[in-house]
Amino acid sequence: MHVEDLLRLESLDLTLLWGDRPQLTREISGVTATDLEDPGRFLQRGELVLSGLVWWAPADDEAKAERFVAALEEAGAVALLAGEETHGGVPEVLVEACRRHGIAILSVPVHTSFRAVTDTVYLRQWGDLSRRPAAPYALPENVRAELSRLLADGTDPDTLLTRSVAHLGTPPAYVLSATGRTIARTPTAPPLPARRAAEAVTATTTVSVDPDASAYAQWHLHLPEPVGTPPRMLHEIAEVLAQHRRATLRRETTARGRATDLLALIDAPPSAAAPAALGRALEACGLADQDPYTVITVKGAADNDGAVDALAEALHHLTDCGFAVGRLPMAEPGEATAVIGTRTRTDSRTDPIAATLKNLWPTLQSRNAKVPIHGGISTRAATPQSLKGALTQARYALTAASSRRAPGTEAPTSNLTAIEDLTTLDALLTGIPADVRTAFGIHALGPLADDTNPSHRMLLETLDVFLTHNGSWARTAEALHLHVNTVHYRIQRVEMLTGRDLARLDHKLDLKAALLCR
């Protein structure tokens, strides 16, 4: 569908304010409705942008409209549809900005809803199934017509799936997420445990609904029993479900924008207005009354854009928990953060959120085994004002998850670490950045840090065994097959080179930490 096709539809009654032939013949890939002042990060190339212009006021300067339209151009938007209701028309300053940036602009009258525009675009883009000629093994024409109406009405996925396979006798059928969540099932399909559903995703009777999505965000159509359905028909049913999926993705994109705003407030320096702003941001994310809160931060490979999808998919497995997933303003590539609301308080020492996610993590990781995903989970924050501390904890636990190694291997002991897991000195130190650990080890050990010296390596080994045996001369000598006097001599050398007194507990801890940081 092209931009000019919208102008030909009398039902929409749109008016062209500016746009030449090159702009009007651009292909529309989708629709996004927004009233953000800078919507660029939430747009995809080829999209039509609907805006009620709530972000603009008559007193605003020209630069504000300029920034808005520049963001559309940079994101690759094909046109702007501006609503007339807010200001009684479309500001001329916005039309001029569109002219300068080569973005077609159309006005939307008060009597035309944005929903009508969106439905028109997506039904046309899909090919309007009710008018598409039936090909061999395609869905019957009456089914295509019914599904078109259901899509336009925004029906739920259970109904959509059931009606899609009704002409086949309504066999058991599921729509499954990448990690085995049941998104929809027919009345004849029994509940499917998540572990079995995750295995079913790779079955031969499963068709991908949206193969272009990230490995963590894909939906799958699964028919566990052979029904003799031609592959073309299954793929057409999957296409129907893909249209519904795109609608949910648009809502998720808007929600992620609100989550990103919430995270920016949590991470910002404290101010007098912060509590009120934080309350509004939590309310916008549907979390205002869901304290206590838990914060989780995850990170994948530097070139991976699926961290937000991965985290969102994992959190969908939590029952009775609301959440907001986004990215911190200065987040590294492949990093995502979420605030989880629970509404319930517990005296249990084991956080049920952490337990559920740890159980799920191997399945999540298997969806894209080449990209390890590490995560850190905070303790519970009792109030919104405690969220900044929880964010700090989650970041620390993330560093620990990325740094911890299983004994004798190069692999992390766990890709997901909760703050409650850091119960030993060794575990605690893993949350410190590697460069800081290395610097501490060098300065605490002094000359002994140079382990290329054979004498120093010998002293480090003796120190390690001595501390492991709680400072026992006899047991250290026995473990190293040395005379006790030799152990005394070596420990004296360690004390002289490091400037520490191993009769003191704090100095023992210093050197133990230094050895762990090497």
Image: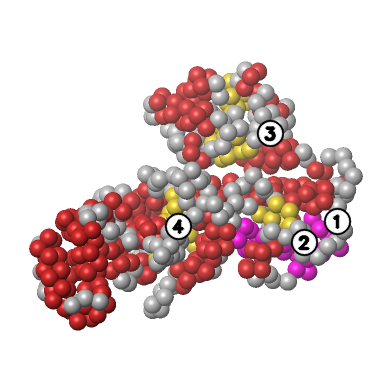
Residue found at the very far bottom of the displayed protein: 474
SS for dot 3: loop
Task: Tell me where residue 450 appears, x and y as whole percent.
Answer: 22, 54
Give 15 or 392, whichever is nearer the viewer.
392
Q: Residue at x 52, y 63 (%)?
A: 361
Magenta residue check for 48:
no
Relative to 74, 110 lies left or right: right
Image quadrant where residue 24 sits: top right
Q: Residue at x 66, y 68 (%)?
A: 196
**Residue range of the region highlighted in magenta in the rendering:** 162-189
Mark 3 → mark 4, Cα distance in angstroms: 48 Å
Residue 293 visible to an observer of this rendering: no
Q: Earlier in the sequence, mark 1 or mark 2?
A: 2
Name which residue type carries label 1: Thr
Q: Residue at x 17, y 70 (%)?
A: 508
Task: Tell me where residue 343 appears, x and y as whole percent.
Answer: 45, 69
Q: Which residue is mark 3?
A: 12
